[in-house]
Amino acid sequence: MIPRYTRKEMADIWTPENRFKIWRDIEVFACEAMAEIGMIPKASAENIAKNAPTHFTPEDTAKIDEIERTTKHDVIAFLTHLATFIGEDSRFVHQGMTSSDVLDTCFSVQLKQASELLLADLDKLLETLKKRAFEHKNTLTIGRSHGIHAEPVTFGLKLAGYYAEFERCKQRLLTAKKDISTCAISGAVGTFANINPRVEEYVAKKLGLEIEPVSTQIIPRDRHAYYFSVLGVIASSIERLATEVRHLQRTEVYEAEEFFSEGQKGSSAMPHKRNPVLSENLCGLARIVRMSVIPAMENVALWHERDISHSSVERMIAPDATVTLDFALVRAQSMMEKLIVYPQNMQKNLDKLGGLSNSQRILLLLTQKGVSREDSYKLVQRNAMKVWLEGKDFLTELKSDSEVTDKITHKELEEMFDIAYHTKQVDFIFDRVFVK
């Protein structure tokens, strides 16, 4: 994490202070459960809950770090520090538990917290995409395949497609959040030999988590692999949106443009530049998020009931991926909210190739008039090539081609160039996307 691409709300989730607060809650809830089933005295559990600090400061973190320099074990260092507040009853803390019970359950809580912020980010982006899609529902533009003019669409239809994609991203993240929100309080190698399963049930309920069916001492990392894969997919969808903006802002296209604020500079050398810096930045940030996917996959195959080869990986990829994706989603929303759209340039580009975007209609009409598909294709293509290579007008060339007019009247040809034909199903598509 670096400040440039970090929002405080997400960064706070990964602070030592938040982590220690969650560790404290896990230990206190476990003691409450143990007291209920008679494992430890109820008075001791009450004393632990009363005296264990509910918030941790940077000073607490420094003291725990100092202890860890001797113990070489973070959970033991934390428990040692906690004991200074609790006193004699601290001997009941962590009874029958192992460090992974605390670490993995805490990690689940943090990922759940991060998911809630990311879901809120997605909702704001969806709201913006929907608003802009309806704003430009009927704004005509040329659709492109391979970067080449294809057939007319509307800019609103483009945005509706992105809305549908990010709605799928939201549903995937909801599933991943549910999948990752599990609790494991099962002791060494996950057998519950030294702790009652009812403790796990109690802690899970208090933290809003599900119970991990078989924890093997750790929560299986297939859950985490799936979670980070979903983050990677969301990042890729951001990149697809950003790439579209970058292409539309190219000087030769110039159909849309990122907002350029007063006083903003595009180049240190060329004062005229208005560069798509936000969308380019989003493409870069997406790579950082996706960078976490392969390490998360590789964390699945751990030795026997557990090892800690995953630990160092997760300490880095979890903050980096969630913080970066959070920042990227907020930036993408702002970019689309302020995106400047140029319908006049869209129309200019639509007209640029002299009506070639209607070629399929002519092809289909010829086949309906009895011409083979192969011959129809040849007839349309030879007239289209004159437009490409000689700058001719497509309709004029078709009207001048006797083999075409032998089958299609001039009036029928003109009807094939009605732009409304290409947008007649826009309402239908919008209903499928936005009407639930």
Image (spheres, rainbow, N blue to C red):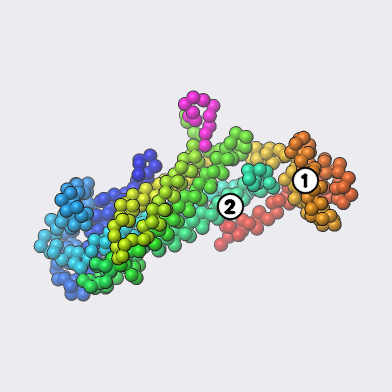
Query: Is label 2 in a helix, a strand or a loop?
Result: helix
Q: Which residue in the structure is indicated by mark 1? A: 381
Residue named by callout 2:
160
- Residue 204 seen in the current view: no
Observer able to see residue 226: yes
What's the magenta region?
A: 265-276
Q: Nearer the viewer, residue 140 or 384?
A: 384
Q: Nearer the viewer, mark 1 or mark 2?
A: 1
Residue 128 % position (x, y): 52, 49
Residue type at mark 1? Answer: Gln
Is 83 left or right of 120, judged from the image as shown? Answer: left
Q: Main secondary structure of the magenta part?
A: loop
Q: Is 15 situated left or right of 65 in this image?
A: right
At 35% from the left and 64% from the top, the residue drawn is: 220
Callout 2, which amino acid? Ala
Looking at the rendered image, the quarter that the N terminus falls into is: top left
Residue 274, labelled with which disc? none
Seen at 75% across and 47% down, the residue is 358
In this view, the residue in front, 354 or 381, is 381
